[in-house]
Amino acid sequence: ADTRYYPASTGQDLIGLKNVNLLMACSGGVTATIEAGDGTTWVDITKFGTSMNLGTTATSYADKTDIIQFKDLQLRYFRVKSVTADGSNAVKYVLRLSSF
């Protein structure tokens, strides 16, 4: 197993931003969770996002293609944590950030 972070282990700075749309496509044994933090401490916020495919929330995403929407976030940093099962994985993430 290997752990990677998107866009980086230090996260995405969200100063002045409060809405995040995350497009993700994972396959080959990848489990993704979404984390928020202050730069040193990170908390799993996956269950607070709304899946556009499912119309509901989830606690993690394993081998899924989905858009997860987070509205009115009051946090400093945001990142995606990917845990891979082996070397035959495919991951694509795209962030769309907005202040309104």
Image (tube, rainbow, N blue to C red):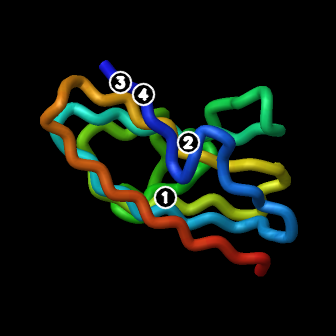
Marking on residue 23: none
Label 1 or label 3, whichever comes before in sequence order:
3
Helix, strand or loop at label 2? It is: strand
Position above or below: 90 against 33: below
Helix, strand or loop at label 4? It is: strand
**Whether label 4 touches label 3, CB < 8 Å:** yes
Q: Where's residue 40, x and y in %?
A: 79, 29
- Which image quarter: residue 16? bottom right
- In whole angstroms, how far apart are the C-alphas of marks 2 and 3? 16 Å
Which quadrant is home to the N terminus?
top left
Using the image as rendered, state which of residue 67 and residue 84 is in the foreground: 84
Q: Is residue 70 left or right of residue 26?
A: right
Label 2 or label 4, whichever comes before in sequence order:
4
Q: Amino acid at mark 3?
A: Asp
- In whole angstroms, how far apart are the C-alphas of marks 2 and 4? 13 Å
Helix, strand or loop at label 3? It is: strand
Label 2 or label 1, whichever comes before in sequence order:
2
Q: In percent of the image, x 69 and y 30: which residue is there?
A: 43
Marking on residue 3: 4
**Whether label 4 touches label 1, CB < 8 Å:** no
- In whole angstroms, how far apart are the C-alphas of marks 4 and 3? 4 Å
Q: Amino acid at mark 4?
A: Thr
> Closer to us: mark 1 or mark 3?
3
Q: Which residue is mark 2?
A: 34
Q: In percent of the image, x 49 and y 61: which residue is there?
A: 22
Which quadrant is home to the C terminus?
bottom right
Q: Is residue 82 left or right of residue 38?
A: left
Label 2 or label 3, whichever comes before in sequence order:
3
Q: Which residue is mark 3?
A: 2
Label 4 or label 1, whichever comes before in sequence order:
4
